[in-house]
Image (spheres, helix red, strand yellow):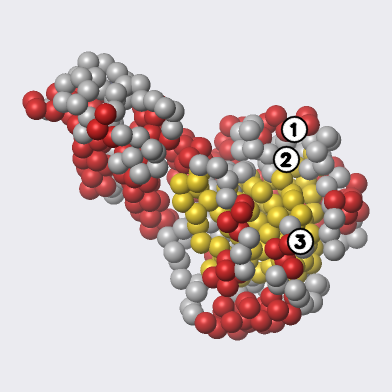
Amino acid sequence: MVNNDHRIVSLNNVRAILKPLTSPHAALFLDLINSWKNFPLKQNAAAQGKKRFGAHFPRLVTNKRRLEQLSSTEKLRDILLDELVDTEKHAEEGLVPFPSDDDLEADDESAVDLVTNITNPSFVSEGCIPDLPSTTLADLGGFEEEVVHEVLFELPTTCSVFPCGHLIDLQHQNESVGFFTLATGSIAWIVWPPDVENLNTMTKAYEDYMEVLDTGEFADVARDLSGGVAFVQQAGETLHLPPFCPIIGLVMETAVLVRYAAVTESSFISMCRNIPLYKAWWNTEICAEEKQACFAKALCDCITHILQGEFDDINMEALKHPITPKGFLPTFLHVWDDIKEDVVSVMDANSAEELKHVWNEFLNSSTTQTCLICGVRCRPDRNHNRSQHFENKHWTQVTQAD
Ligand SMILES: [Zn+2]
């Protein structure tokens, strides 16, 4: 039973748990904790490092009520066995959320074996189940209460099953705000702030992926990150993880992690600003081209929804520059000139044309005499003035991916 007194959020407590372990992963974690570059999650002690996280600091909250619905690890095991048998749920869904250890995915037989043994905290096996879509666990309810403000869309609830001792390799959380609830087991985590310095380190490491692997484990890149917070998540606790945080985990006891995630307005804008990180990351992934194509399509769809006013309560026909009240559409228009090159650079020629068309429809939907993006005088499109203005000032001719 977890309560606030038993949270493992000080460096001494985390150290005490890691020390008896003999694996090289545990040694890496101890090095990171003893390096003076990282902090405990414990609220006050982390104050110094907190600033680098900006507005969103990782949080570990107790969530017993949700787990009471599961009542026992045996019941959880049976639910997961059904989910496994039910369908071939390993199919990619276009989303490639954390964790994405493609090569560590257990085959069908060992997946069943792993799930069968989640009742054994020290069960060891080779692979893991990185990403099992779980409608049953989503249906257990409670997750919608976690929905943060300004949600654009939610990702399907999935769960991961990790054997004891498994390293959840260093990676960045994707563009979503993550809510990771540990249904059983325990995991030691270090989460770093997604600031320019750390994300540059991650981008560089992804770009040099093969060379990094030549000289050691990818996890060693964690030694170059700083300002992280360390803690051990226990069963019944939910980790609130801000978008883009680099993260590494070490499974201390056979774990089932239920993951719910939502993309918010601000995380969508961060996503557009972090496209160079994605490009470097795809470089390390199997099926990089497909992943980029899926990403570009999702991006294009989302921008279309924004420009069609689907996320804002705004009268689209009466739009004038600057658009009030503040909302997602005005924010997006405000940052567009900064992000346009990166956005267009991931699209193939057809998607880019499509996106340009959506923009022109949007700009010409209003009868105002000024450009909705920059406010310069610019008539609606009878003589293509406005489309020409968009093309010259708010579009880009960067080479597109094909
Ligand atoms: Zn303009």
Where residue 205 sits in the image (x, y, percent)? 58, 44
Where residue 268 sits in the image (x, y, percent)? 47, 41
Where residue 165 sits in the image (x, y, percent)? 76, 65
Cα distance, mark 1 to mark 3?
29 Å
Residue 392 in sight here: no
Is residue 336 toward the left or the right of residue 396 in the image? Answer: right
- Circle 2: is it few (<14), some (14-19), or many (20+) Cα within 10 Å? many
Tell me the mark number nearer the camera, choosing from 1 and 3.
3
Residue drawn at x 79%, y 59% as measured from the top left = 234
Residue receiving disc 3: 64
Residue receiving disc 1: 49
Q: Nearer the viewer, residue 86 or 18?
A: 86
Mark earlier in primary sequence (1, 2): 1
Residue receiving disc 2: 228
Q: Amino acid at mark 3?
A: Lys
Q: Are marks 3 and 2 in contact (CB under 8 Å)?
A: no
Cα distance, mark 1 to mark 2?
7 Å
Q: Is mark 2 within 8 Å of ligand 1?
A: no
Is residue 317 toward the left or the right of residue 139 in the image? Answer: left
Mark earlier in primary sequence (3, 2): 3
Tell me the mark number nearer the camera, choosing from 3 and 2.
3
Cα distance, mark 3 to mark 2?
27 Å
Q: Is mark 3 within 8 Å of ligand 1?
A: no
Mark earlier in primary sequence (1, 3): 1
Residue drawn at x 66%, y 81% as measured from the top left = 78
- Circle 3: is it few (<14), some (14-19), or many (20+) Cα within 10 Å? some
Secondary structure under badge 2? loop
Is residue 238 toward the left or the right of residue 27 in the image? Answer: left
